[in-house]
Image (cartoon, coloured by chain):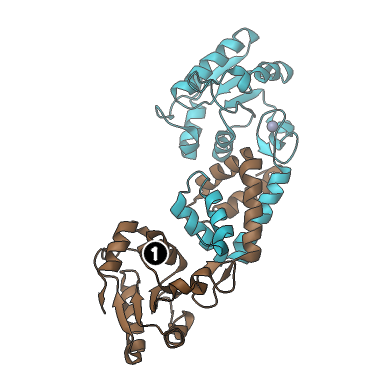
Chain colours: A cyan, B brown
Amino acid sequence: MAEDQEEIEGLIALMARLPGLGPRSARRAVLQLIKKRGQLLVPLADSMRRVAETARECLRCGNVGTADICSICLSEKRGTGELCVVEDVADLWAMERAGVFKGRYHVLGGVLSALDAVGPEELRIPRLAERVREEAITEVILALNATVDGQTTAHYIADQLEDMGVKITSLAQGVPVGGELDYLDDGTIGAALRARKTF
Amino acid sequence: MAEDQEEIEGLIALMARLPGLGPRSARRAVLQLIKKRGQLLVPLADSMRRVAETARECLRCGNVGTADICSICLSEKRGTGELCVVEDVADLWAMERAGVFKGRYHVLGGVLSALDAVGPEELRIPRLAERVREEAITEVILALNATVDGQTTAHYIADQLEDMGVKITSLAQGVPVGGELDYLDDGTIGAALRARKTF
Ligand SMILES: [Zn+2]
Ligand SMILES: [Zn+2]
């Protein structure tokens, strides 16, 4: 590519690293951005810059926002004694979109995986028992993906919390085998939550 | 969405406006960007800012780059007397990736469309005859998409150039009916160019 297109080629290469965009769609996206410089390219660059400066993980639950403690953790109304354990932030957001869960969250940041050498210390698992104690949690809802690693992780957590006198449930009906939470429709998530069963 | 997530929601909404990204993939892309703040989010914001400041259309051919006149137009070697007419910049880039055309380009910026009220004045069509004269063009290759509007535009241009003593050809063999140039593989584009026929 010629020198006068290096800058644009660089942007295409960066865009192509985003999940869901290949080289062709990255090229089309960049041409679109250049066409809509004022309405899209400049606002996007500014928004990215602001997010880069302000985005952080909630120190308590692992949700992503711009405050040290997220609004869900801070809300009095969400102190129902129910704590929903999810694999990642996308799953938390999917639960919130479904709008049926009124308690708080705990984002693990992944699942246990022998293959990828992910142990409990790599995840937000040690903090979970502390939160159950400190926040007077009465029910832990394991909303992990219905994958082998997800279910291994659920069993591990259930073992860890066994002697703490907390009720442990899991999403049941409605989660397809091998399915991932973030790809379910809101109704399915709602049904699975309402029909949760003791783990 | 809570106040502490407004900034992030704003970025997701902007990302979802890119071609090829829906709301779900925009959310996943933004979470990925936040995870890879230093390697991806900051470089992307900087690159977008630079492209917003420097990208421009070549005054001669309509290619996108960072110079007033693009390197293809400036290159002595590309002064073969052949001028390839394409619908948009993505098609020019597709031709360049195929690497078989050694002349220069003329990007129309769209095709004639009665439905969308796109006439010759909305496109870079008036400039085409001027370039044929000024640049001693001997052959105009109409590399327009094999769609109804693309072919209507090709015929319109052929009529305009009829009395100028220039050879007019079109990509022929290899372009599937209804197909768009940017989705073809390099080999197909090369074959179509080599087998071009008088229009
Ligand atoms: Zn939180
Ligand atoms: Zn040019």
- Looking at the rendered structure, the secondary structure element under dot 1 is helix
Residue B157 seen from this side: yes
Q: Quadrant where the N terminus of chain B lies?
A: top right
Chain letter belonging to callout 1: B
Q: Quadrant of residue A63?
A: top right
Q: Sort mark 1 into few (<14), some (14-19) or many (20+) by Cα contacts within 10 Å.
A: many
Pinpoint residue B182: horizontal percent, then vertical percent: 38, 61
Q: Amino acid at mark 1?
A: Met
Looking at the rendered image, the quarter that the C terminus of chain B falls into is bottom left
The quarter of the rendering in which ligand 1 is drawn is top right
Viewed as shown, does residue A85 lie left or right of B153?
A: right
Q: Nearer the viewer, residue A159 or A10?
A: A10
Q: Is residue B139 left or right of residue B70?
A: left
Residue located at (62% from left, 50% from top): B44
Residue A44 visible to an observer of this rendering = no
Query: Between residues A19 and B116, which one lies in front from this camera angle?
Result: A19
The one nearer the camera, A49 or B104, is B104
**Image height of B89 relative to A18, above or below:** below
Q: Residue B80: where, in percent of width, then height? A: 40, 76
Residue B59 percent location from the top left of the image: 55, 77
Residue at image x 39%, y 27%?
Answer: A177
Q: Please give left or right for residue A34 compared with residue A24 in the image.
A: right
In this view, the residue farthest toward the bottom is: B163
Say which residue label 1 marks.
Answer: B95
Residue B118's spot in the image, x, y percent?
44, 79
Location of residue A40 by image quarter: bottom right
Q: Is residue B28 above or below residue A28?
A: above
Q: Residue at x 49, y 54 (%)?
A: A26
* Quadrant position of residue B187: bottom left
